[in-house]
Amino acid sequence: MSRWLMIGAALAVSGFAFSGVCVQATQQAEFQEQHDYLDDDDRRPLADLRFDVEPTHEQNLKITVSALGPNVEPIAGFRGIRGANRYTAEELELILAGQHKVEIITEFENGQSVTGRILNGRSGAIPERRLLPTGRINFLAQTLDEYPLELIIDPQTQSSGRRKTVVIVNGRARLRCIYNIVDGHVEGLEVQSAGGHSFLADMLAPESAGSRLRVLLASIQKSVPPVSDIEWNARDLEAKWVFLSTQIASEPAKISAWVDFLKQKKEFQLLEWMAIYVPDAFKSHGVADALKSSDSPQWIRVVAWHTTGPFYLGHGEQQATSLLTSAPGVAEHWLDTHKEKIEPWEGMISQIYEGFKSDDVPPMDSGKYLPPLQVVDVFSHLAKSGSVVDFADRKQAQPEAVYVHQIVREINGVAVSGRRNPELLNHVRQLTAHSNETIRQTAFLAHTYILPSTPSLERFDDFARVADDSKESAGIRESALMAFSYHNHPGVLLKLHQVASDTKHPAWNAAVSRIGDIGRGFSISRLKELQKATLTTDQSKLLNDSLQRLIERESAQRGVASWDMARRIVLAVYAQQSGDPNAKHVREWVLTSKAQMTQADAQDLKTRWSFRSVNDFWHPTSVSEFEKSYNELRAEVLK
């Protein structure tokens, strides 16, 4: 669904793709307007959108789409760092590879029209957290590959007057901008995003995309087998999985070589496991394409499994839809045969099926393809995790044994699948208390995917206790605080600041890094105060990174909406009633920020945002006492 957005304007990178002649942009614009792309499905900012008036051609407005920006939401889970989105960068890479038919047309009020073009922007690595083989997290890591960080839409206009620039992708309008340029400044900018998640429908194989350097490196890696045939063939299926998982963990850059190796060896079961258990493997690492291009027995069921994933995970539901609709005859027959066994039969998968039924393509026999994946089979070991064995350097698995790697594999599968049924969630929660530390840590970090959409006060309290328990290992305390920080709860940010105040706390890095993600205005003064403490070089780097991200995000804010002020008031009241040491700073920030509200937002705060409207489930005192304090502070804000 498209929306007119005057502020927070949108370019749907997740639903916006185009190709054409690409050249390098060399001239830096003097006048800029910055906006956010708000996803059409859940309104998360997934890209930064800048409107730059070109200094040497003052009637030309260039539109820069960037995977980096102060408000850009990260990829899901603990790896993502706010201010950058690797999935957006991957889409920019595919766009610049020329996967789409595109037209950029600008129309003036007098009927004149001009055709635009695409320019290359900057390239570079994307900031991401990375779990190290040591069990600790690198909070200042970057992607091993470089990606296009931005691309530029150049309308190539020279005439003055009000105009409309339209970007048409594969015959469909994806972006409309109406504006005028007066004295080198944009006036009356209106932006309509016609995004969505169907942008892959006409896309070619993802592995054909990429910069020249990445393609060259990938070809070199693929030319050298990652393991000898003798060493590989000496192992059974589970032993092969342990071997490749260990290799990928120690050398992540070789994952493409492993995918190509498994494809050549027709190890389709292992590719299927990668697709459903390994984050990003299905789409970003080309496993889906490997399964389909090999016409493997698994490809349809793996694709069908991924069509049910939520959009916010970004693990390949768009590509799954594309691949399924690229084989309408056989896919329709497979869905028709197995629709009663597909879990769940709703949303995108049912829509695809109805689309097949209404087209003119006759069904084709799908008997060679395996039946749908079942939750009970995909996660069969989670309920058998009482006594587990480390696989170590075995070459063969024992039939009755349950291995650590099997539990870890399935925990990750729950996280990336988007399936949130209570039984699965309860299994993962219980595994945070498992006797095996690797399993515990995996279960904690899985909650960084699960908790944003699954609030739970029990986990909130439990995870906080583990993070504070000096008897726990540093890796577990760090992972527990990371999991804790993904709760939608006012106590989260307050707790992060408490941990950050103790520079010797094992989870200090986690606290400071996450404050950079979710911190508010008062967090700036608290982090600046931390700069006076005695810190290691690495701590200083992390603190400065989080502080810079936070300052940039706060500086980009264009005011305080009524709903945001209501949340600020709740945070201040919660801090005061829970005795938080930063309660005074939070309250002062709330009262100072009221000057950023418009009269309309102030009226909306008064009439619409009562405590009952904004509160979810958290208050450290009685509801009546919390509501009384909320109303008092709201009245002070409205003075």
Image: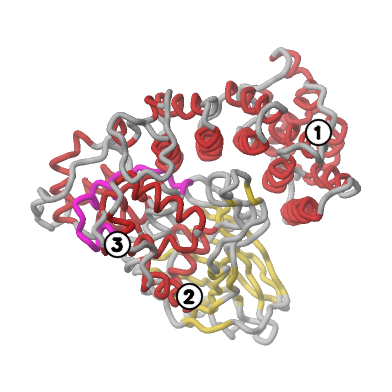
**Three-letter residue code for mark 1:** Leu
Residue 249 seen: yes
Name the secondary structure under disc 2: loop
Q: Are marks 3 and 1 in contact (CB under 8 Å)?
A: no
Q: Badge 3 is on which residue?
A: 229
Colour setup of the view: secondary structure
Horizontal and vertical percent for residue 113?
47, 81
Residue 148 higher or lower than 232, as above or below = below
Magenta region:
289-313
Q: Badge 2 is on which residue?
A: 211
- What distance separates the C-alpha of mark 2 from that of mark 1? 53 Å
Name the secondary structure under disc 3: helix
First in sequence: mark 3 vs mark 1 = 3
**Three-letter residue code for mark 3:** Asp
What residue appears at the point 81 percent right and 47 percent down from the top-left corner?
Answer: 524
Horizontal and vertical percent for residue 35?
63, 60
| Label 3 crowd (10 A; few <14 / some 14-19 / many >=20) | few
**Three-letter residue code for mark 2:** Ser
First in sequence: mark 3 vs mark 2 = 2
What residue appears at the point 43 percent right and 60 percent down from the top-left corner?
Answer: 255
**Which residue is at the front of the view, 403 or 19?**
403
3 or 2: mark nearer the eye: 3
What residue appears at the point 58 percent right and 21 percent down from the top-left corner?
Answer: 458
- What distance separates the C-alpha of mark 3 from that of mark 1? 73 Å
| Label 2 crowd (10 A; few <14 / some 14-19 / many >=20) | some
Q: Is residue 309 magenta?
A: yes
Q: Badge 1 is on which residue?
A: 638
Q: Is 219 positioned to the left or the right of 350 in the image?
A: right
First in sequence: mark 2 vs mark 1 = 2
- What distance separates the C-alpha of mark 3 from that of mark 2? 31 Å
